[in-house]
Image (cartoon, grey):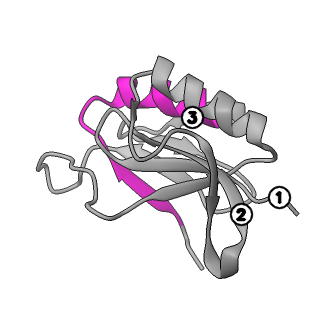
Amino acid sequence: MFSHIMIGAQRIQQSRAFYDAILGTLEHAPGIADEKGRIFYMSLTPPLIVGEPIDGKPATGANGGTIGFSAGDSATVDAWFAQGLAHGGTECEDPPGFRTGNKGRSYYAAYLRDPAGNKVCAVYHPK
């Protein structure tokens, strides 16, 4: 469905440290910079890209937008959350824990704002 996800940021190196840390907990390799200074996080799914907005205007977090990352278990979600806080993220929503989603299914999630204000989460869906 997606070709990529692009996140805007002004302080690229601060955002890079944040995403290297949280995505490292999910077993993804550190980001790779291109010639324009954008940071690419490659995987078997479409890449996540962090860079300055092309229009030159300030980057802002999407109101109502969230990017969710899959985790293999609740301990990984907790590690993701701790690394995010340690690397410039800020807590938002409820603390990490179980929530009830569609059709009453339970899932474990944690939410953060990245250094640029974008909302991200890690989610574990028990089988």
Q: CA distance from mark 3 to mark 2?
A: 32 Å
Q: Which residues are magenta?
A: 4-23
Query: From the viewer's perspective, is residue 121 above or below residue 66?
Result: above
- Residue under the point 57% across and 24% down: 83
Hey, what amino acid is under mark 1?
Pro
Relative depth, front residue between 23 and 120: 120
* Drawn side of residue 44 relative to residue 18, left or right: right
Give the mark count: 3
Do the CB atoms of the residues marked 2 and 1 lie less than 8 Å apart?
A: yes
Q: Which residue bears the numbered disc 1? A: 126
Q: Which residue bears the numbered disc 3? A: 31
Q: Position of residue 2 (x, y in %)?
A: 56, 73
Assign a secondary structure to mark 3. Answer: loop
Q: Which residue bears the numbered disc 2? A: 106
Which label's residue is closer to the chain start, 2 or 1?
A: 2
Q: Position of residue 1 (x, y in %)?
A: 60, 80
